Image: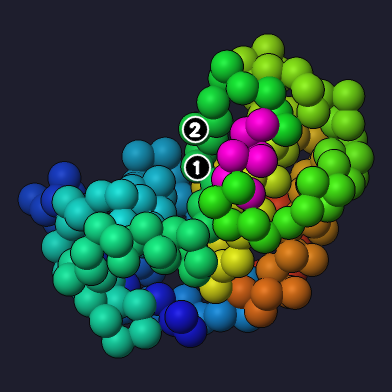
Amino acid sequence: MERIRLNNVLPNVFATRTDISSEIWKSEVTFERNQLYLVEASSGTGKSSMCSYIIGYRHDYSGRICFDEEDVRAFSTSRWTHLRQRSLSHVFQELRLFPELTALENVLIKNQLTGFKSREDILRWFEAFGIPDKADQKVGKMSFGQQQRVAMMRALVQPFDFLLVDEPISHLDDANSQIMADIMMEEAHQQGAGVIVTSIGKHMSIPYDRILHL
């Protein structure tokens, strides 16, 4: 997949609003591979909804979302499954990790589906993220900032054309935010992928190709 295009998209919940001022909603915007985007938003303007629409988890919107030239509304469940394993990866704002599993198990369970990274690669990430001692700890006993790093690792253990990261550093200090950004961008560059970062204020300090206001 080379591009994602949103054409006149608007969440159904906003259908009766007349005060929409956005570079994404009710507009035409294209996200390209090999490009880095920041979507800045205020709370309640629909940034997590936008991510859910793009990855096919929700369809409660008007307008069209196209991958290359195909309207995603026509995609079957099996097509979405393939896309989420091979073309699209996502770090949810609420992370959606399994609290009863260890940090390493949360990453490995995804990697078993894709076979994309070795166990040694993943353990090196734990070292780089500064949490090697947390690999065998249950996620439910970790801080939210530590969980954010685990969620990022899980998102990176697959091939992807686009990576969506929804408020990925809300609970990280500047030093750990930069580490996350460096690891994420290294993997994205290796895959020639596009990256879409959302933020309601604090965001990764990286050279965005385009900043959009939701």
What residue lies at 40% left-to-right and 76% top-to-bottom? Answer: 4
Closest to the observer: 106 or 33?
106
Quarter assignment of residue 23? bottom left
Category of crowding for the residue at label 2, using alpha-carbon neighbours closer than 10 angstroms: few (below 14), some (14–19), many (at least 20): few
The quarter of the image holding the C terminus is bottom left
Chain part drawn in magenta: 105-111
Counting from the top left corner in percent of width and height, residue 141 is at 68, 12
Category of crowding for the residue at label 1, using alpha-carbon neighbours closer than 10 angstroms: few (below 14), some (14–19), many (at least 20): many
What residue lies at 23% left-to-right and 68% top-to-bottom? Answer: 75
Q: Is residue 182 left or right of residue 6?
A: right
Spatial distance from mark 1 to mark 2, Cα to Cα? 7 Å
Task: Name the residue beneath numbered marker 1.
Answer: 92
Q: Amino acid at mark 2?
A: Arg
In the picture, the disc for residue 144 is none
What residue lies at 74% left-to-right and 65% top-to-bottom? Answer: 187
Counting from the top left corner in percent of width and height, residue 61 is at 18, 57
Counting from the top left corner in percent of width and height, residue 172 is at 74, 34
Closest to the observer: 191 or 45?
191
Quarter assignment of residue 50? bottom left
Is 88 rendered above or below residue 178?
below
